[in-house]
Image (tube, rainbow, N blue to C red):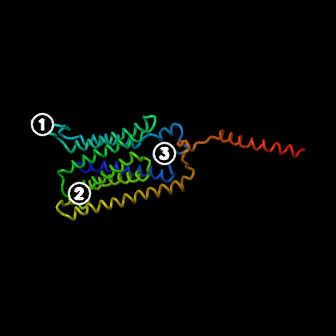
Amino acid sequence: MGNFFGYVYPGLFLVLYGLYQALVVSKAVIFNDSLLYPSWPPKNKGRWARLWKISFGGWAKIMTGILLITYNSTTEEGFRLLSRELPPRFMYPKEWQRVTMFTLLSLSGCADVISKNVLPQRCTVLEKGAQALSIYELLLLLVSHVKDLSGVKLQLHSLLILVVFLLMVVLTAEMWAPAMFHLRLIETFLHLMMGSWLVQAGFILYRPISGYPWDDDDISDIMFVTTFFCWHVIINALCLLVIYSLSSFWHHCYSPRLKLMGSKEAPYHESTPEPLYRVLQEVEQPEKDDQAPLLSKSSH
């Protein structure tokens, strides 16, 4: 990504986004709620209900993408596509690839906002389709991005490409099953893996803990890159488990009065007292008609 912050900034965003999605999935699992149409607490009514429905994840994608585009397009000589020499040559190829990646991130956020806050009915196909398309193109850009890499840097990017490929498969499956908990959980885990691995790559390449750069010719350094990746898998899996455990403990011990208003979202849960009262009246009326002759006979 060019420098230390070019790895760390996108990585931190993906980690925070993954943590947010982990909380959403944990809440849905604990309360047996819908992932697509989550309910809100009873106190959130009126204006607060509208605020609750805002696509915070979509706006976060848009703003983060714009900031990262600005950061990567700032150069001393000016950010141009072609050089002024003859014949003209393409300039800043990797910078343009990064700008394309972050543009896709912003477009995915726009699709989320349009689906949740603009269209009269939420379109999950638009959200998942835009997100899957951005990951498809990200995979293509990363494969081209590693053409001139070698050693430790190649190993770091190869493992990142593996995570992106798995995320592409999961998002493709979610286009047909957007409400499946297992797929959303795997997607959350892969976002955490991408984010934490980008941060780790920034430290390995530009700020190693030992103070000495990693040796591309030392096979032990390349092997330890894969070992660190496995540690990230374990740590992120434990992170999801801790988030679920803490969320379950909080909702069961400290928020006993927090009940989801699923009846306001799902039509099959809706019931009104007036129809039930009428049904009871209709059931009780024949019973009274049957009892009336018996009473008249007993009186005689």
* Residue 258 percent across, percent down from the top left: 55, 49
Q: Which quadrant: the C terminus?
A: top right
In this picture, is 219 found above or below 70? below
Q: Residue at x 62, y 40 (%)?
A: 272
- Circle 1: residue type: Pro
- Circle 3: residue type: Pro
Work out how far the residue at label 1 is from the one at label 3, CA to CA, in angstroms: 54 Å
* Residue 20 percent across, percent down from the top left: 41, 49
Quarter of the figure with residue 113: top left
**Which secondary structure lies at badge 2?**
helix
Q: Earlier in the sequence, mark 2 or mark 1?
A: 1
Indicate which disc residue 38 carries. 3
Along the line of sight, the residue nearer the viewer: 239 or 263:
263
Apparent side of residue 118 relative to residue 73 in the rendered image (left or right): right
Indicate which disc residue 155 carries. 2
**Which secondary structure lies at badge 3?**
loop
Q: What residue does disc 1 label?
A: 88
- Circle 2: residue type: Gln
Q: Earlier in the sequence, mark 3 or mark 2?
A: 3
Quarter of the figure with residue 114: top left
